[in-house]
Structures are given as C-alpha cells and as structure tokens.
RNA sequence: GCCGGGAUGGCGGAACUGGUAGACGCACUGGAUUCAAAAUCCAGCGCUAGUAAUAGCGUGCGAGUUCGAUUCUCGCUCUCGGCACCA
C-alpha cells in the first residue's frame, strides 16, 4: 500500500464504488429489522454550512453503526425547498425563485455526496416539486372537508408602501425592511388548522416519548401550556361584560384594575371617537406582531375611561388598555393583582394604581410582588384560608353569583397556514360569486404553481395576483367563472409530513402507501435544537391527522430524537453578515471528508453548541495520518514478525486485551445509550495510543496487533468510512468493511485481579495502593492506614472516627 | 418579559449512579531528526510558593446538605436557543 494518506484519491474511489454497487439503497423486502434514521432536511440556501455537516454526519454515523449491527437501514435526503429566501434572492438576482432553488439543490446535493453520506439517493424528494405538493393539496382538501381547516380573519404586518404582508423577521424597529416605513396591522381572512383539537393528545403523547430529550418535552409541554384556573366575569355599566381568565382566582379580592389587550373588542370600540386611545392602539401596533418584542418591551397603558364592577365586592375598578396583555391568550383580558403578579406590580407602580395585598407573607414588603403561596388576608369571608383552598372557595362563590366558573385553559392556539407569498404550495380553494368558498375538485389536482415568473422588486404584492392564467378558473360546483385562492401554504406544512413521503417517494396514486407502515415511525431523528417546539409539534400533529385518515399507524412520528447544538465561531452563530463562516467545501478539499467528519464529531458533544477551531481540524487530520502510518507499518511487519510465545509478553498482551474490550464496551454504550460521539473518538484515540506504547516497549506479536487494529477500524468506520474502508482492504484482503459486523465484547478479557484504590484523609487525596480483588474490606482498611503517605496525616490511631470504603475505588479515613 | 439550555486550564472538552478534577485533542515550550524548513517522533504543560520533595488554592458567583460536591438543594450573574409569518 501507499505510505502516504492520499485522501482525495481514496475518497473518490470509495464513493464511486458505493455508487456503482448501490450500496445504501433501502428495500422493504429485507428480512433484517428495519431502522429509519432521518436528519432534518435542509433549506436549499445555496451551499452547505457547518451546521449541515454536523447534522448529516451525526445521522450518517448512526446509520452506519446500525447497519453494522444488522439493521435494514433507511437514510433518505430531500429539500425543504419553498420559502421566503428564494423570493428575496430572486428579486436580488432578477431571476425566478424556481431556478435559483433548483440550482442550489444541484450544488448542495453534490456537496452532500462528497461527504460520503450513506444516503439512499433514489428516494430524494423536493417540496417544491409538484409530485410532492400535489398530495399536500389533496390533504388540505380532506382536512377542509373534515372541518380541521377553517377560515377566520387574523392580523398581519402590513407594509403600506410595498403593499405586502411582512414576516416578523422583515419588521425592523417597527418598520418594513425595504420600505423603511412604519408597519401597520391589518386584519385579513386566512386559513387555520385546528391543532387545538389535538391539544390533549399532543400533551399526553409526550409521556410515551421516552427517547426524547427531557428539555424538548418540557418546552413542548409549556408551549401547549395547559393550566387550571377560572374564568371570571366583570360587569360593565353599558356593554355586556368582560371575561378574564386567571390561574390565581385566590387573589380575586386583590384585583385593583382590569387590563385588556389593545386588540380587544372593547379597546377597538372605545378607540372610535377617542383620539388618545386610537393613537395608543396605533403605537402598540408598531412592535411588529411578535410576542417577544411585545413582552420584552416597556409596559405601556392607557385608562379606558370605563369601570367594571368587581363580582364580589361590587366596587368599581378601572379598566386599562395595556400592551402587556396578549389577545391570543385566554380572553385577551386579565384581572390585575399588583401585589401578587410581577407584571401587574410594575404596571401599577408606573401608573400609580392601587396595590392591595391579599396573601400573607413575610417576604412581601411592598417593593415587589409576592407570587408564592400563603394564607389569605384582606379578603373578607376568605381570610385565613390557604391560597390553594381559596382558589376553589372563591370560584365557588363567583359561580354562585353567576359570574364565573372553573376553567382549563391552553396556551396553544390554532395554526395559521395562509401566506401571502408566491414561492409556496398554492392553497387549493376557489371563490365563486354564487357558490362561495369551495375546495378544488380532487380530480383537478394539482394546482400547479407557475414557475416562469420574473421578480425584480419593482412589483408590489404576490406575482400570483397578477397572473389571470393562474387565478382564473371555473367554479367546481356551478361551472361559472371563478377566482382561485392566491395565498400559499406556510412552509411548515411541507416539513410536517416529508418524513412519511420518503417511504412512498415514487407513489403516483396516493399520498402514502403500505411502505409507510413498514418504515414508520422514524427510529432516530436528528436536527437543530431551534426546531424543538414548532416543527416537531407540527410534525407530531400531522402524524396524528394522517393516522385519523388511516394513512399511518404509529401515533408518534419520531421514536428517538437528538437535538444538535449550533456551530459557532467566535462565540456567535456563523452568518454571512458577520463574516465568520467556514466553508465546508474548503475543508473537504484541504483535508478530505473523513477529517471534516471526524473533527465535527470530536469537537463537542452533539447536543451542545460547537465552537469552531481552525487548529482543531489539524489534529483530526493528524490522527488519520497517524492511523494510516501505523496500519502501513503493521502490514510491512507481516513477513518479519512472528507469533512466537514469549512469557515476558503475557502481561502486556493481557493489558492490551483489557483495554481493547473495555473500549469496545464503552464505545458501544456511548453510541447506544449516551449519544456521546466525542467520547467515542477520544476512547479510540486512547486505544491507539495504548497499542503504540505497548508495541514500543515490547514487540507485540503480529496477530495481537492485527486484532486490535481490525477493531479500531471497525469502530471508526461509521465516523470515517473512506479511510477505514481503504485500510480494511489492505489489512484484511478479500473482505469488505461495509459487510462487517460491529465488534463484540469478550467479558473474560474484562476480569482484573488487581485494583488501584485511592486513599483520602478527611476527603483529601493522600495516597493510593494496589490490592488484590479477593481482599476483604477489613484487611483493605487496615492496609490503607499503614500506607506511608497516609501515616503522616494520622498522629494517633485513636483519632480515627470512621473509615469509608467504596468498592474498588476509594477509602476515606475520617479523623477529628 | 416568558419558556428551555449552557458556564470546568491559554482553547475545545472528559469525569456516565455524590467518590482520584482536567481523559482525548488543540495551542504553547524544550529536545531529536534535517544543510534548513515542513512533516514526524520524544518530553513537559491548571494556578501560587518552592531547585525539588511537597504544600495551599482551584469547576461562573454566594449560601447549604455530606466523611466527601463539577455532580444534589436554594438564591444570583452572564450567555445561547425558542416565543407562533426566518427556516
């Protein structure tokens, strides 16, 4: 073999072999147990970034590891191809989004192939392909007919100059990113999916996901946000009444004002004819619609001029319009209890509203709200009750007055799926003057998105609104001229079911076929932690909807989940605007795919953010060069070195064998249970170091080295498949590493007859000793006291209070 | 603001179930090899004091539990991700 590690040549050769033998094509007729490994598909933004390399390497390591363990593995790839960036790029480059997207896909596909991923490329899908989104339109119609999709008006960010709806991302300091003018809020009709119909299922389903990170389940649980409280009515002098939802009915007697959202019906009603209120509502609209901006900003409010009647005390309390009250949660109105809620407290201080303490606490001194539990005070008949008991008592009282009831509330709200954009899946709906709103007939699907558009930025609004060829159609019911919906679907719609389509990728007549139930659920799903809530919740929701349509059998789409951390440079996210990107292409060219893969898996735990280091990659490359050299040297020794029996070698061989098998054990556990890839690599590095050190002192027999090197290559294969495949061909001719099994542990190699025990005095390390594994506990303690370095710290044996012994690990002598 | 993470040498990280803090790698320093350099190999490498043996200190900060805490509890700080139209 060549003494030099020529990675370029090797990687190209091996990849060509994989391609020629169709090595990673997955089949449903395989007798082995199935394993579906999936990485979140990329948005085709132009070229691969390090986050992709990380994501897909993790997926590939798992796929290859599972193949070695006798599974029939499916690892597919596709493109989340619709979305806003394509429109922006099209405007910038004066081209069509479809052209830009397809060129990106072509380039990124070739980059992924250079990484040596064991993907079944036959199953590639692209969401902007009509073969894909046709089924999305079909599903839309089914769900519309079932009543799971409905229409209602909802608020969007409106750019009055560009005459277009803006994404939250496009609103900067309350202004449109292109026009620079203040954004308005506009109510327009939009389609919604009733995800709230599935709220309980989605919440309870989390219980069964025992291979999901606890943090993701917690985030989803909080997002769904089930809470138990009460809905209480406050009467108004004229209009009907105001309902508020509260989780703290126990503090009702401390409510000193009501706060309503700027979008609340009463706010809007009062703004008519009141310039001050009108201006305030306008002011609130500027934040750009995102909850983060609203809640992080300064609390502002205005007195509405109206008072509400407290249901129990019958006192009049003022109603304020406040920007910190969210229209989307509860009833869009809250009873403010400044003494026991942080936000209400801050607001009361600012506007000098009364504060009334109703829960007793030593920690309450009037400088900040007390939100803990306690006994009620200043609450008339409820005084002396614990606040937990008071919750029921007060709700009962309110209920008896006909002014409220116990209520379970959810934070989760229905999913708005309409987008006033061009580059997306057309919503298959038609508007007829006579028949009204109707879905497209199934037989008329697909509604194809015209791709021959030019976007130069001079136009305003969506191009679809100016394409009569697209929007003119016949009413499916009466046949008269009608107009097609020009909104497209949220791109989350596409990414909510792609995992299923890979199984039925070439099915022309159905959305999904029987193959879906062979492969689903996905056994291992890998993707960025930024998708922990929305994408993963929508996909879980879709899976249940597909289940209700009889298309899939599994309740949950993803059995095991790994959320990878971000790739950072200089402490922040790599981004073009910051100029701190690292191009994976350059790495592949300079060091090869194996080095890039090895480094990205070694540099940090998969679930944590990874700080990029240019130096670190040198170390990974050095390791592969070293491995190459060691195997090369070993092969040369074949004819020279003999397997003779030398008694001096018994101990080193035994130790090496112990190291080998304890490494196999640790590495397997790290991959199976801990998702800890960085420690897998460092353990293998240790084993290789151990081998070279043993061989340096004593010349090890050829067969001993051969066994260890074979195992090292097998364990490294999922990480660095090219070099291990090449070296395997040299070290074990006539066999192929791709058909080899993962190494197994020989338990007898793990038995040791001696242990090193650490000795502490009062918890401080003072010495150690080697003891035979058959020694009794009393004997070990006795010996420990006699160790010279320990003796110094014990003046008198009578001082010894106790001796703690942790088996095969440690002795702590406590003196006093 | 709310929800969820994270913080350990000069750097990335390891220590899995409360039991030797710093594995593995990087950077650096010294040496070997070389005409020289690169590459490679060998040795050293938490901080402070000391020639050294060694001692003290040390896991973001402040308390607590324990024979023993990077690990558990409470209270903070900073930082990253998400907050429903970025994907």
Image (cartoon, grey):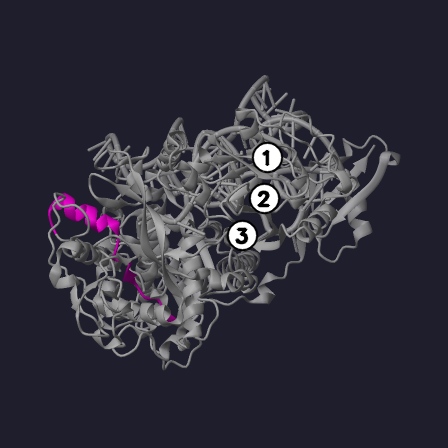
Residue ID at (12%, 55%) = A453
Residue beneath label 1, please? A317
User: Label 3 lies in what chain?
Assistant: A
* Marks 1 and 2 in Cβ contact (< 8 Å): yes
**First along the sequence among labels 3 and 2:** 3
The stretch in magenta equals A73-95
Of tags 3 and 2, the one toward the viewer is 2
Q: Position of residue A126 (x, y in %)?
A: 25, 63
Magenta-colored stretch includes residue A299: no
Dot 2 crowding, Cα within 10 Å, few <14, some 14–19, many 20+: many
In whole angstroms, how far apart are the C-alphas of marks 1 and 2? 10 Å
Q: Nearer the viewer, residue A94 or A685?
A: A94
> Which label sits on residue A234?
2
Q: Position of residue A343 (x, y in %)?
A: 55, 34
User: Label 2 lies in what chain?
Assistant: A
Residue ID at (44%, 61%) = A195
Q: Is residue A197 above or below residue A512?
A: above
Secondary structure beneath dot 1 equals: strand
Q: Is residue A745 above or below residue A161?
A: below
Q: Nearer the viewer, residue A319 or A282?
A: A319
Dot 3 crowding, Cα within 10 Å, few <14, some 14–19, many 20+: some
Count of numbered circles on the image: 3
Q: Nearer the viewer, residue A408 or B8?
A: A408
Location of residue A99 (image quadrant): bottom left
Q: Is residue A168 above or below residue A173?
A: below
Residue beneath label 3, please? A225
Of tags 1 and 3, the one toward the viewer is 1
In whole angstroms, how far apart are the C-alphas of marks 1 and 3? 29 Å
């Amino acid at each position: 073999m060549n003494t030099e590690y020529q990675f370029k040549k090797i990687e190209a050769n091996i990849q060509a072999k994989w391609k020629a033998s169709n090595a990673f094509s997955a089949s449903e007729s395989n007798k082995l147990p199935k394993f579906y490994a999936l990485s979140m598909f990329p948005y085709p933004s132009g070229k691969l970034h390090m986050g992709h390399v990380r994501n897909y390497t993790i997926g590939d390591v798992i796929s290859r590891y599972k193949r070695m363990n006798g599974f029939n593995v499916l690892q597919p790839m596709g493109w989340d191809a619709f979305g806003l960036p394509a429109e922006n790029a099209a405007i910038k480059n004066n081209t069509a989004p479809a052209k830009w997207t397809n060129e990106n896909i072509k380039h990124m596909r070739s980059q992924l192939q250079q990484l040596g991923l064991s993907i079944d490329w036959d199953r590639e899908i692209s969401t902007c392909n009509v073969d894909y989104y046709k089924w999305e339109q079909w599903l839309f119609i089914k769900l519309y007919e079932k009543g799971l999709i409905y229409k209602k008006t909802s608020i969007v960010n409106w750019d009055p100059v560009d005459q277009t709806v803006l994404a939250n991302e496009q609103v900067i300091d309350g202004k449109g990113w292109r026009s620079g003018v203040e954004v308005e809020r506009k109510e327009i009709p939009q389609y919604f999916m009733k995800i709230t119909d599935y709220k309980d299922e989605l919440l309870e389903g989390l219980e069964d996901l025992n291979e999901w990170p606890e943090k993701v389940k917690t985030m989803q649980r909080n997002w769904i946000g089930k809470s138990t409280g009460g809905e209480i009515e406050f009467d108004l002098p004229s209009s009907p009444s105001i309902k508020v939802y509260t989780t703290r009915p126990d503090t009702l007697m401390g409510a000193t004002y009501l706060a309503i959202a700027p979008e609340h019906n009463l706010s809007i009603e009062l703004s008519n004819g009141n310039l001050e209120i009108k201006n305030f509502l306008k002011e609130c609209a500027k934040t750009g619609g995102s909850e983060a901006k609203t809640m992080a900003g300064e609390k502002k409010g205005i007195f509405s001029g109206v008072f509400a009647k407290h249901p129990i005390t019958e006192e009049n309390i003022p109603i304020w319009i406040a920007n910190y009250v969210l229209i989307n949660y509860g009833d869009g109105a809250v009873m403010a209890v400044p003494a026991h809620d942080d936000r209400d407290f801050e607001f009361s201080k600012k506007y000098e509203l009364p504060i009334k303490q109703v829960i007793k606490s030593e920690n309450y001194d009037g400088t900040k709200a007390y939100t803990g539990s306690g006994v009620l005070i200043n609450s008339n008949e409820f005084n002396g009750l614990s606040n937990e008991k008071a919750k029921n008592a007060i709700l009962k009282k309110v209920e008896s007055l006909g002014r409220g009831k116990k209520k379970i509330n959810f934070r989760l709200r229905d999913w708005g799926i309409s987008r006033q954009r061009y580059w997306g899946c057309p919503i298959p709906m038609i508007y007829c003057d006579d028949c009204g709103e109707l879905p497209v007939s199934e037989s008329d699907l697909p509604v194809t998105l015209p791709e021959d558009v030019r976007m130069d930025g001079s136009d305003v609004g969506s191009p679809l609104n100016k394409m009569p060829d697209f929007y003119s159609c016949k009413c499916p019911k009466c046949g008269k001229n009608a107009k097609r919906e020009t909104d497209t679907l949220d791109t989350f719609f596409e990414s909510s079911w792609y995992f299923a389509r890979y199984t039925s990728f070439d099915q022309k007549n159905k959305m999904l076929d029987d193959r879906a139930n062979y492969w689903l659920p996905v056994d291992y799903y890998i993707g960025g932690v930024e998708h922990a809530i929305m994408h993963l919740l929508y996909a879980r929701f879709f899976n249940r909807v597909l289940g209700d349509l009889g298309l899939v059998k599994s309740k949950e789409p993803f059995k095991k989940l790994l959320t990878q951390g971000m790739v950072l440079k200089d402490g922040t996210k790599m981004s073009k605007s910051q100029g701190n990107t690292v191009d994976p292409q350059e790495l592949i060219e300079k060091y090869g795919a194996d080095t890039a893969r090895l480094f990205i898996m070694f540099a940090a735990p998969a679930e944590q953010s990874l700080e990029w280091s240019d130096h670190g990659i040198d170390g990974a490359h050095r390791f592969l060069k070293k491995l190459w050299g060691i195997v090369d040297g070993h092969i040369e020794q074949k004819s020279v070195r003999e397997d003779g029996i030398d008694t001096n070698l018994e101990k080193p061989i035994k130790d090496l064998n112990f190291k080998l098998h304890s490494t196999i054990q640790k590495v397997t556990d790290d991959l199976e249970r801990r998702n800890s890839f960085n420690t897998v690599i460092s353990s293998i590095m240790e084993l290789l170091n151990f081998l070279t050190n043993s061989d340096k002192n004593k010349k090890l027999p050829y067969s001993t080295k051969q066994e260890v090197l074979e195992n090292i290559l097998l364990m490294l294969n999922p990480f660095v498949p090219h070099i291990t495949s090449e070296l395997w061909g040299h070290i074990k001719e006539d066999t192929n590493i791709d058909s080899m099994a993962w190494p197994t542990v020989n338990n007898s190699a793990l038995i040791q007859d001696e242990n090193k025990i650490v000795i502490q005095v009062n918890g401080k390390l003072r010495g150690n000793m080697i003891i035979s594994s058959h020694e009794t506990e009393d004997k070990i303690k006795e010996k420990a006291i006699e160790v010279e370095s320990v003796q110094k710290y014990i003046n008198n044996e009578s001082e010894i209070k106790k001796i703690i012994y942790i088996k095969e690990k440690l002795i702590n002598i406590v003196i006093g």
